[in-house]
Amino acid sequence: MKNISVIGAGTMGNGIAHAFAQNGFSVKLIDVNQAQLDKAIQTITKNLDRQVTKGTVTADEKNTALSNIKTVTELTEGVKKADLIVEAATENVELKLNIFRQLDIAAPANAILASNTSSISITKIAAVTQRPENVIGMHFMNPVPLMKLVEVINGYATKKEVTRAIVELSKTLNKVPCVVNDYPGFIANRILMPMINEAIYSLFEGIAGVEEIDTIMKLGMAHPMGPLQLADFIGLDVCLSILNVLHDGFGNPKYAPCPLLVNMVMAGKSGVKSGEGFYSYSGGSKELVVSAQFK
Ligand SMILES: NC(=O)c1ccc[n+]([C@@H]2O[C@H](COP(=O)([O-])OP(=O)(O)OC[C@H]3O[C@@H](n4cnc5c(N)ncnc54)[C@H](O)[C@@H]3O)[C@@H](O)[C@H]2O)c1
């Protein structure tokens, strides 16, 4: 594989393009929004600059990586020579199904179609194409250039050769691939989200405060970040939507989202990106400040 197309130039798309470009692949970064493409190139440049400062990448390698990325707003144009397409567009079922219908027509017949979805069924996405055996989940973690894991998700029809190819490819990106099967939440979110939900329930029931819950999990379990801070970082709206996928998919009440999480999302408090969640990010402080609501 040499030519990689990445669809969606948001948080994940720019990181995925960065990882491939830095490892010598030729990348077409595709987004419907030109401003997002421009912003993605700025972010990749800034992140590569940081790597140069740290000494993990040379200035020449930075320039080569940047020259490996071309931006495109037209999907058909962007995927016509692709060996692999990694879709990292907005987490919305209908939007993704539409993209995969288009990819099935526009991508070369033997291209592998991968999705970076956090929670949508790979089997469902694959079923709208005429090549479900070539569709797979390639779930990178945020921030992509730093995080080692790629959760590789086999859809119901994914063929073994495709899984093997994606495992080998992930290794060439210096990542560690882990293969799992396609059930709600896969593995990462099936285990992470109930933990976050339980942390929110503990707060909701008044068992402990925000700082206590996060400190217990950080110092007691050696987690780099407490579950409430992590929820803010992921986005409370994203956490809610993944919990709903688990709840609907398994029909088990243990996955029911905590009413406090539902309320916070309805109130527009979705964490870092909205300026407030369990912590407040609006005062410009570098220290974590617990949101006034929970003091
Ligand atoms: N953010 C995370 O921490 C994280 C982690 C793992 C996986 N994911 C998954 O990665 C995917 C992307 O998430 P994100 O956080 O980068 O989202 P984002 O909102 O930052 O970016 C999405 C991008 O997709 C673009 N887009 C929308 N429709 C498009 C289309 N039809 N064609 C091309 N581009 C289109 C948008 O313009 C935007 O730039 C989602 O499926 C999400 O579940 C996110």
Image (cartoon, helix red, strand yellow):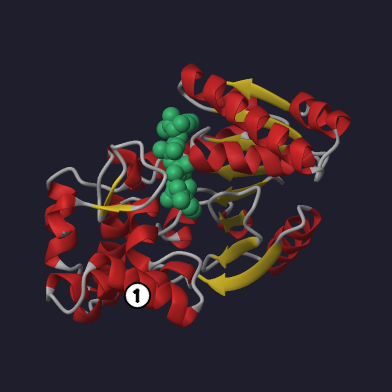
Residue 90, horizontal then vertical, whole percent: 40, 40
Q: Residue at x 18, y 43 (%)?
A: 268
Say which residue label 1 marks. Answer: 195
In the displayed structure image, the side of residue 69 where residue 123 appears, left or right: left
Identify which residue, 91 or 265, lies in the foreground.
265
Q: Residue at x 26, y 58 (%)?
A: 240
Q: Residue at x 85, y 34 (%)?
A: 61
Res. 281 visible in picture: yes
**Image-quarter location of ligand 1:** top left
Identify which residue, 36 or 101, lies in the foreground.
36
Identify which residue, 18 or 47, lies in the foreground.
47
Mark 1, residues whose alpha carbon is within 10 Å: few (<14), some, or many (≥20)? Answer: some
Which quarter of the picture shows residue 200?
Answer: bottom left
Q: Is residue 199 above or below residue 27?
A: below
Residue 92, horizontal then vertical, whole percent: 35, 45
Specify the amino acid type for callout 1.
Answer: Met
Residue 278, horizontal then vertical, whole percent: 25, 56
